[in-house]
Amino acid sequence: MLLEVFARVMVPILVIVGSGYLFRLTTDFDIRPLSRVSLYLLSPALIFSSLVEAEIVQGQTLRVVAFSVLLVGVMAALTLAVGGTLGFSRKTNTALMLCTMFSNTGNYGLPLALFAFGQRGFEQAVLFFVVQGILVQTLGIYLAGSGQGGWRGGAATLLRMPQLYAVGAALTLRWAGPELVTSSENVAGDLFRGVSLMGDAAIPLLLVILGAELARAEIDAGDVAGISVATSIRLFAAIPISYGLAYVLGLDPLSTKLAVILGSMPTAVNVTLLAVEFDLRPKLVSSVVIVSTALSFVTLTVLLGALGAG
């Protein structure tokens, strides 16, 4: 059963991630332009087209938002409690909170949801991805800055991100009637298919970027304790916490599975950028990203098998 899940879900992901890893390892490939294309063009297109076409139940959407916010809060509190018990410094605790609060629901979680749960699972995973993206761009920046810019800086960055406007445009079209752009009998439908095609390109590109990012990251052996704490919380403690929140909030069966899977994904790669920008233990953060991502291919395979995915 687990081998079947691994073959159907993880192997396709590993092939693409491994390709990005080897490509950057063997060339002088500069990942920054590709990341910007993904961030400012393909990911917004993916969010827009997915939200327009998705079958969204309003009550479930509000529950997904509540789940994402509560999960971030619980993970932060748990990390702070463990870090305080172990005597970590304030800077280290803040870095570890950044690692445990935000999971890789984008360039890892979205493809995983697609391979494991099909198109419907992917469409619902987009909701989790959008909510966490907003949290990273606001709460994440505030946390990493430790008061340098605060909420004002986080809000300013959020307003510059095209994902926000992609969500707004998609919700507006859903209100007006998605058939206006999904029809093949008008120009609007032709334009939408172009945007949708760009969105389709985002999935493999996100995985290539993940592999390329991992190829140049470094593990600092001096941070074993911090790495162990963050990885354990992110991959293991998050499972019962995510399930408990999903149960209390009354998420439907598919959303519950997605909540547990996406809630226990490895640390988001983009938190490394925040750690570097604000000098918040960047080597520790990048080490957690590497270790949690590597171990997740095992933990998520087991979890997917237990949830009957694949």
Image (cartoon, rainbow, N blue to C red):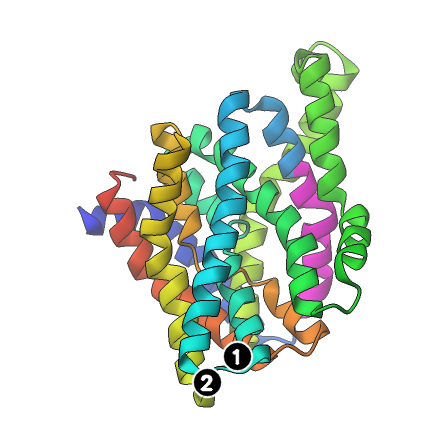
Residue 284 circle label: 1
Depth order, front residue of 84/164: 84
Instruction: Report helix, strand or loop for mark 1.
Output: helix
What amino acid is at disc 2? Asp
What amino acid is at disc 1? Leu
Mark 1 surroundings: few (<14), some (14-19) or many (≥20) residues within 10 A: many
Q: How many angstroms separate mark 1 from mark 2 (CA)? A: 6 Å
Measured as percent of width and height from the top left, residue 178 is found at: 66, 16
For the residues labelled 1 and 2, say whether their Cβ atoms are less than 8 Å apart. yes
Residue 55 seen from this side: no
Residue 223 circle label: 2
**Residue at the spot x=53%, y=41% of the render?**
128
Q: Is residue 43 left or right of residue 207?
A: right
Of mark 1 and mark 2, the one earlier in the sequence is: 2
219, above or below 140, in the image: below
Quadrant of the rendering where the C terminus is positioned: top left
- Which stretch is magenta? 30-45
Mark 2 surroundings: few (<14), some (14-19) or many (≥20) residues within 10 A: some
The answer to whether residue 19 is magenta is no
Q: Main secondary structure of the magenta part?
A: helix
**Residue at the spot x=43%, y=55% of the render?**
265
Residue 150 seen from this side: yes
